[in-house]
Image: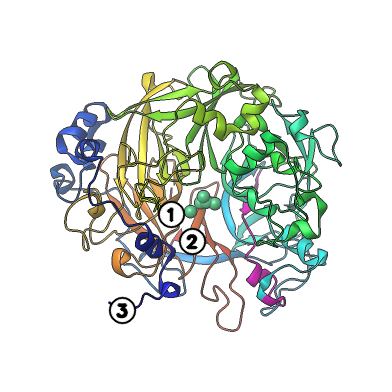
Amino acid sequence: MSQINYDELSFDDEDELKFPRPTVHEFDRVVERAVSRRGFLGGALAFGSGAAVMGSGLLNSSALQAQQTSRFAFDQLAPQTDGTVHVPGGYKWDVLMRWGDPLFSDAPAFDPKTGVPTDGSDRVFGENTDGMELFLVGNTELLVVNSEYANTKVNLPAEQEGKPISAEDVVRLQNFQGVTVMEVAEGPNGWEVVVDSPYNRRIHHRTPMIIEGPAAGHDLMKTEADPTGTQSLGTFNNCGSGRTPWGTYLTCEENFNGYFGATEPTVLEEATVAGYSRYGVSTKIDPGRYNYHNFDPRFDISRNPNEPHRAGYIVEIDPSDPDSTPIKHTALGRIKHENAACVVAPDGRVVVYMGDDERGEYMYKWVSRDVYTPGGDTSTLLNEGQLHVAKFNDDMTGTWIALTPQDTGMSPAEIAIFTRIAATEVSATTMDRPEWIAVNPVSVEAYCCLTNNSRRGALDDDGNVRTNAAGEPMVPNAPNPREVNRYGQIVRWRPHNDDHAASTFDWDLYVMAGNPTVYTEGLYAGSANINEGNLFNSPDGMQIDSTGLIWIQTDGDDDNEGDFSGMGNNQMLAGDPVTGEIRRFLTGPNGSEVTGLTWSADRRTMFVGIQHPGAPFPDGEGSLPRSSIITVKRADNALVG
Ligand code: FEO
Ligand code: CA
Ligand code: CA
């Protein structure tokens, strides 16, 4: 047997070699139901024709095959592997904004080889675009966009290994991340950012924030600089987005843990140690990706052990008021927040669906105590309510379990700060990395992208099924039925009584991504709405447009080989929720993730995010790669959503 070169293996391939899939599937019974026509037609009674799309590659859906008409106004785009963006015939795309483009006329010029200098790095568009939403304030359109993380080799190209080695480097990285508010307008030359608009704003890792909700003022939230535990600086790892009915932006703090480190061996309190362990906060002295802790004491857990407790929240920003202070809403829990899908229940209460993106973590729902009244006071609406976590049953029903002091043995503040620990106490269902959740505006249902989970059902060195951070074995379960899940799936649920505030629901899988050209049978072939033409893996970003079409963005393996052959670069596809048909619409440059989607006020333009391009996109050879927002329009300027 030839020698294995681990350097040439992807993370997942190496993982499989080290932790091979068990040959005996212990989950046969539930898988049988998940893929059987009988099981999903059972679901179809509740779900209408949409459930007919379910089934494995073994089981063709006659409903899908019989489909005569398509709702899509475009021909399917072929997979692509090059360094640019592609859209179908009849559509056009353009670059709106790149990392380093100016928000203000005093911003420094972008240098194609060195990027942006530290001085003025808070006057330009941030790096690694992610969730975004568009707001109409009067007749002004404001695009609000997350900048999720820094790619230090790109953002600090002058430093060896791209590691920050000075306080100045750290400030530059802090300035490139967070949130950008910017005015956009469409003119004769297409869409442009209005430089120097009074609405333009950068919110970064040092911007003052207010902390509200049950954790505000708790001892675990107090630091040397903030003995009240009610004010913090910065919002971190801003991944997906959301919007409230009252016109504010929700930015979602995901992998906040990565910004912290220690400068010396440190003894911590028991609760803090447990929290660090569950959320992956490092107590190591090494520089990590960001090395903040060696230059900014806030990130040094040896000096400020409570600072990590002040990140990992949903943060509300009012884009219409550039002087407003963002609010961290601890009531909505502290997890690795992907996005926040907000909907108003029939009785006026506000419901926020949220995913915790880590292998084997959970899905959450928060329901406000008070009701939303259009035009009424919303200033305290997100402060009081009940957080729930999802439990999925094998019979395709589910329950939102309330995280109460009684059932968790934790105080309201502890539930808000150590939400994951509270959820484990009530036996929530471990999921395959919940990414974006989207609520269908034309039907009472919601969807969550479960992107992948290479460790689901895989064995560790001792032959035991691998666990999540709580130590729960990640055995396959009904909505996550695949061992070593490389492709991902989208789960859909319909709340009982057509009420998103209801505590019970029915669910099915809208799609299981897969590769029927590699696996002719079984769960790896994917569901019946996956075919040779629309292959993709790792659904992540998701929005549902005003007509009810689902737009699915991917962040997966784009090597186009082996299990992933025929998938090409990361992409955006459209899905019909009723027929289940899925069609590729857009492909990103190689190396990139397609993430973030919103529409202009007239619905004639889509704004799409291209994050971390591998190629020198969009400026071409000789330039650093620049994450960018692009516009996509129909050539005839018709509606696109
Ligand atoms: Fe930032 Fe889970 O994606
Ligand atoms: Ca994501
Ligand atoms: Ca992802």
The tally of labels here is: 3
Q: Residues within 10 Å of mark 3 (few under 14, many from 20)?
A: few
Mark 3–mark 2 distance (CA, rounded to whole Å): 34 Å
| 194 shown above or below 444 | below
| Mark 1 or mark 3: whose residue is earlier in sequence | 3
Could you tell me the amino acid type at mark 1?
A: Gln
The residue that appears at 86% across and 42% down in the rendered structure is 225
Badge 2 amino acid: Glu
C-alpha span from label 1 to label 3? 38 Å
The mark that comes first in sequence, 3 or 2, is 3
Q: Residue lying farthest bottom?
A: 622
- Tell us which disc is closer to us: 1 or 3: 3
Give x and y (percent) for residue 5: 40, 76
- List the residue tagged with mark 2: 593
Frontmost residue, 161 versus 267? 267
Q: Residues within 10 Å of mark 1 (few under 14, many from 20)?
A: many
> Is the Cβ of the residue at disc 1 closer than 8 Å to that at disc 3?
no
- Disc 2 vs disc 1: Cβ atoms closer than 8 Å? yes
Residue 480's tag is none
Q: Is mark 2 within 8 Å of ligand 3?
A: yes
Residue found at the very far front of the displayed protein: 462
Q: Is mark 1 within 8 Å of ligand 2?
A: no
Mark number displayed over residue 2: 3
Q: CA distance from mark 2 to mark 1?
A: 8 Å
Numbered range of the magenta stretch: 139-160
Residue 569's spot in the image, x, y percent? 40, 67
> Does residue 622 show up magenta in the picture?
no
The percent position of residue 192, horizontal first and vertical second, equals 63, 62
The disc label shown at residue 553, or none: 1
538 relative to 21 in the view: left or right: right
Upstream in the sequence, badge 2 or badge 1?
1
